[in-house]
Amino acid sequence: MLFIHLIPEKMLNKALQLIFAFSFIIILLGCSEDTERFRSEAPHFARLTAKSLSDGSPTLRVGQSFVLTAEQEVRGKRLDRTIYRWEVANAADWTQRYTKKLVYDKQPQHPTDTLVATTPGVYRITFTANYNPSGVVQPKSLTYNLKDGGGTVSLNASAVKLQVVLTQTIRVR
């Protein structure tokens, strides 16, 4: 205590400011390393494929089952509870079968939907995935095109949720 009283007040303030600034920089550097190591990331989707279950061809026919697959080029990281939703615009009487809820880190396979079409035509498919992160999320929004040029992917990331929406059209004969 006696030592502090011997230091001029201006010098003491400068010393405390330097110590505070140095401590703040050290904390930031330490956190950025942890943030990178514990970052949650959504998968990066490359394409949406549609294949007939009967012969594996890309030709989809009314009354025959086919599978839609949202192919991930890069798998997601540190994702917990996940909710998937597949929608086909203007196809109320189609049958669909897909997994709605899962824990992504335990089941990171490509999301699929098995369908049977009742009417020929061109249909817009929308796949929505809501991921609950188990790590740190870098907030961002971006949109990119699928590799085959037939659809788009939108990503919206906040501190508590990652949402991916993939849209593309398919033709049923």
Image (cartoon, rainbow, N blue to C red):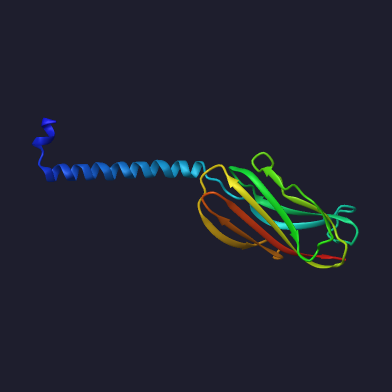
Left or right: residue 161 versus residue 98 is: left
Near-viewer residue (146 or 83): 83
Image-based side of 69 in relation to 138, left or right: right
Q: In the drawing, does residue 55 fall left or right of residue 137?
A: right
Find residue 52 and report its horizontal and vertical position in percent: 86, 56
Which residue is at 79% across, 57% downward? Answer: 50
Instruction: Name the outermost residue toward the bottom.
Output: 121
Give the camera-side residue of 53 and 139: 139
- Residue 147 appears in the figure: no
Q: Residue at x 68, y 59 (%)?
A: 166
Q: Which corner quadrant of the image does residue 9 belong to?
A: top left
Q: Is residue 63 left or right of residue 142?
A: right
Rendered view: 171 above or below 28: below
Q: Quadrant of the N terminus?
A: top left
Does residue 9 appear in this view?
Answer: yes
Quadrant assignment, res 20: top left
- Residue 18 higher or lower than 85, as above or below: above
Farthest residue in the front direction? 92
Query: Residue 113: horizontal and vertical position, in percent?
Result: 78, 52
Number of numbered discs on residues: 0
Q: Residue furthest top?
A: 2
The percent coordinates of residue 125 (x first, y second) are 74, 62
* Quarter placement of the C terminus: bottom right
Q: Residue at x 75, y 47 (%)?
A: 99
x, y (%) of residue 122? 80, 68
